[in-house]
Image (tube, rainbow, N blue to C red):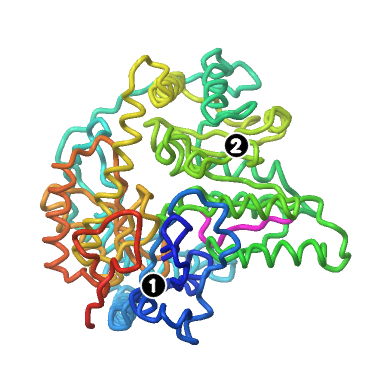
Amino acid sequence: MTESPATKPANGDVCQRVKNGLKPERNGLLKSLHRCHERQSKHHCHPEEEEVHAASHHDSLYSRPFVESFEETPMLVAVLTYMGYGILTIFGYLRDFLRHWKIERCHIAREKEEQKDFVPLYQDFENFYTRNLYMRIRDNWNRPICSVPGAKVDLMERASHDYNWTFEYTAEVTIKYGVGVASTRQEIGNLDRHEDMEKLVAKFLGVESAMAFGMGFATNSMNIPALTGKGCLILSDELNHASLVLGARLSGSTIRVFKHNNMQSLEKLLREAIVHGQPRTHRPWKKILIVVEGIYSMEGSIVRLPEVIALKKRYRAYLYLDEAHSIGALGPRGRGVVDYFGLDPRDVDVMMGTFTKSFGAAGGYIAGKRELIEYLRSHSHSAVYATSMSPPVVEQIITSMKCIMGEDGTTIGCDRVRQLAENTVYFRKRLREMGFIIYGNEDSPVVPMMLYMPAKIGAFGREMLKRDIGVVVVGFPATPIIESRARFCISAAHTKEMLDRALSVISEVGDLLQLKYSRHRIQPSMARPFDDNMYEDIDD
């Protein structure tokens, strides 16, 4: 875990455990903090732990506690997880043998015999994983919703008679067609409501101008190529979303990856870029673009934005901030991670976000200086070729954004932002008290709960659904192979009674499936701000 000045005791002798606030290894690291506390009288930690202390020269950049935890995977759990995947792989090859001799029917697409000498359309391992592992638990994903997406939703029942290859729906499906403009913004698809929405987005973010797009994924993947190209350098966090990765690759820029939220790693790459320049020619880079997210959707961690901005200014780079999960959810005014840290929006060169989470709509936006937006209007593929946003979706965005800003004449927006923060802290605290391993920042409404073993991915999703709670479970390749997890996204609409019922069911299923892996139980009387006595050791 990390500590900021507001969380450190006055004597300043507490040993901080995690290098620059995050995992020095991929699995994360969370040492027993009270062991270091016992050694405070010696004014130093054990020599073997000195390499994971946090740099203190950045403490002045934070005005509030910044606490994140990534508990190390227990060794027994990691071994059993690998064994589980190994057993599934063995049975997968056995089933492939049966399919080869037509003993078992194969439903998945395969290469034709006459095309065997061509470049394969399907990657062998991904195809193997899909047909032998993913299909076993496919019923845990893409569940159809047949109600308004509020605090509670109705899931449509479905059944499968061929082991999740196909599904039959047990209820009638009514498809309602919405209205659309059916043209691009540059032709006849630009409406006055589009312009009103973009002005409102710019006002909400505190920047000069903004531009909206019909698809959040394309907002990243189609705009990054318009901003950088050959001779430019992109420094990307290792856990950035696939849309950011695709956009960087499509741009033709040189891409270098730094460790997740690790400022030493980022600064090292910046120094090397300035000193050495481009490969072979050693000419200066035309542009250096740092690409980060506000909240990382699979880890639940928050970007260390004050330090990123400080590095960006020091080395005169540009900053691209993806706030898909943080806009409308973080900060006292719900204006994202910039508002959360109390920073100036003008320090972020390119602000990106989506309307699919906090605003209950669709699409995304790019915001920043007026010159930037005018350039994208004529150079972005997503602006030039894509159909403009549907008018009902635009109206939904305007209404919800005015609600958050308080321009609807009520305090509903402010109340919900405050309620979301309270729900987040309460939900995370209770899960840790129960003994689950929870990743991420304590203020992040994205709450990953570690499952690890492949058999428990499907089992957890199914057992929760039996108890009328739908959960999102995530596994490889969206996560590292031994770090499968369930991901909870907390809403302001959840009442304490709803959260308590969900927590009760999660605890029940956790006991049933033995998911309470944590060796560091938080005491029920945990108080904020964080102090280093909040953990107690639990024997393996």
* Mark 2 secondary-structure assignment: helix
Left or right: where 316 falls relative to 524: right
* Mark 1 secondary-structure assignment: loop
Q: Amino acid at mark 2?
A: Pro
Question: Magenta stretch?
Answer: 233-241
Looking at the image, residue 32 lies above or below residue 468? below
Residue at the image position 61 percent from the left and 57 percent from the top = 236
Mark 2: few/some/many CA within 10 Å (<14, 14-19, 20+): some
Magenta-drawn stretch contains 240: yes
Left or right: where 202 falls relative to 133: right
Which quarter of the figure has residue 255?
bottom right
Q: Which residue is mark 1?
A: 30
In the rendered image, residue 94, in percent from the top left (x then y), is placed at: 30, 80
Nearer to me, 132 or 337: 337
Q: Which residue is mark 2?
A: 345
Magenta-drawn stretch contains 90: no
Left or right: where 260 falls relative to 31: right
Which quarter of the figure has residue 231?
bottom right
